[in-house]
Amino acid sequence: MSGPWEVVIGLEVHAQLATKSKIFSGASTEYGAEPNTQACLVDLGYPGVLPVLNEKVVRMACMFGLAVNATVARRSIFARKNYFYPDLPKGYQISQYELPIVENGELMITDEEGNEKRIGITRAHLEEDAGKSVHEGFGGSSGIDLNRAGTPLLEIVSEPDLRSAQEAVAYMRKIHTIVRYLGISDGNMQEGSFRCDANVSVRRTGEQELGTRAEIKNLNSFRFVEKAINFEVERQIELIEDGATVVQETRLYDSDRDETRSMRSKEEANDYRYFPDPDLLPIEIDDDYVAAVRASLPELPDAKQRRFVADYGLRPEDADILVLSRPLADYFEATAGATRANAQVVANWVLGDLSAALNRDGLEIAGSHISAERLAGLLDRIDDNTISGKIAKEVFDAMWSGAGSADEIIDARGLRQITDVAAIEAVVDEIIAANPAQVAEYRSGKEKLIGFFVGQAMKATAGKANPGQLNSILKAKLSG
């Protein structure tokens, strides 16, 4: 932010990994089961049980590391992070501390001035999720659901390089896009599978030493990230300007009151008494393994955006939006490959009418009522002047409602555009003859009246006259 204060933000993003079983047990990770039906003895830390690492989480962590140009450690270890919490049945969390699997990555965001900015990624480490405390419906008590305990997490820790809530949201969105492109997390924020903790501090502009930070826990929407950080920044500035000091602590964001409030004092690393987990061997991977993972990576969002601009001639801002979702980008490419229409026209329809319909009905692109091939068919009918752009919107709505393909709807409703010059001229002649006063005004210099004549002609042809031909014929005859 500008002015006497500089904001310093670092994010810890927690992405649940999309494995069918947990990180150290064979228990299911499926969301929505009855409470405490998917927590096995390993997850609960019963005596005599031993954790066994799920190999898929190692591969997923490597994929992420390579996607953000990080170093993938050839040797990493698990540690026990000791603390008490009601939904942590073992009294410790298996995580990584001194030797994480991913270190020193980066990604680029667009800052508030529209410039590219590098954000460093300190590390990404594997760990198990805790259970969940449930506070509603227990008459003042709380329930504990341990289904989530042991679900694999990738915790992605940024450098304190973010300088505003807007930058924090841009960074989090970029991480969200990457993990979904890679297929390593569904990124479902409503279900808690993608969330973050924000470390926020302020310092006077020009100072080098970091201010005292507060950690805001468990932010599970982009909007909450922005609002919580903005509130916390103002809170800290007011404290300092009033002569008080910021306390290092963990805070929660209350979305109903739009405020953060104190949860507990912030622990330091030594409070957790980290030590290597004696039940788990180190993770050791070789160069061949990393090379195989690299070869399996899909085209990533930044590369896809550049290709869409270079190969399809799209506006950069449209390409930016299309690549936010891999399925949406795939839909665009499938449509563009099946139609003769210009790719920018395809993008306009995908980001315009199609996205509006999806949003209205609460659907993702996979649930679209119109396939890429059928949208391509509609765009072909615009391209070859069978229908006008205005009529195309009527056809689109009918297609969305299940009335058939574009061609079927056009034929059934008699919507084919009138392109016969003689037929359009006949309509224009009738309108000119019926409106001598408007003709005189137009010829006296009121050229805006062309809209009146176009409207009359469209009304007479039920909107079927080719707009380009109609305008040309009208102007020629009105000038005569």
Image (spheres, grey):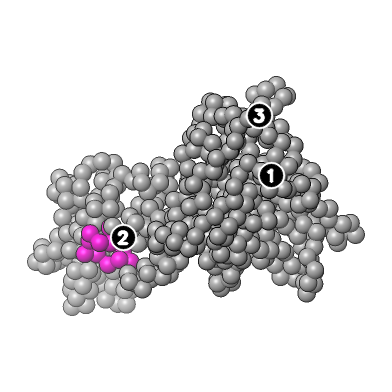
Relative vertical location of residue 195 with respect to residue 69 in this rendering, above or below:
above
Which stretch appears magenta?
335-346
Q: Quadrant of residue 167?
A: bottom right
From the viewer's perspective, is the residue at label 2 or at label 1 nearer? 1
Relative vertical location of residue 281 with respect to residue 144 in this rendering, above or below:
below
Residue flagged by tag 3: what amino acid is it?
Pro
Between the C-alphas of marks 1 and 3, the distance is: 16 Å
Image coordinates of residue 128 in percent, x first then y, are: 60, 42
- Going by the image, does 140 lie left or right of 247? left
Image coordinates of residue 341 in percent, x first then y, are: 24, 64
Q: Which of the marked residues, 1 or 3, is nearer the chain's N terminus?
A: 3
Q: Quadrant of the N terminus?
A: bottom right
User: Residue at the spot x=24%, y=51% of the render?
Assistant: 374
Which label belongs to residue 407? none
Q: Residue furthest right?
A: 243
From the viewer's perspective, is the residue at label 1 or at label 3 nearer? 3
Residue flagged by tag 1: what amino acid is it?
Arg
User: Residue at the spot x=37%, y=69% of the render?
Assistant: 307
- Main SS of the magenta part reads helix
**Residue 3 or residue 150, whichever sits in front:** 150
Which label belongs to residue 333? 2
In the picture of the structure, the residue carrying the numbered disc 3 is 47
**Residue 361 or residue 186, whichever sits in front:** 186
**Residue 405 or residue 470, whichever sits in front:** 405
Residue flagged by tag 2: what amino acid is it?
Glu
- Other-residue count near label 1 (Cα within 10 Å), few / some / many at <14 / 14–19 / ≥20: many
Between the C-alphas of marks 2 and 1, the distance is: 47 Å
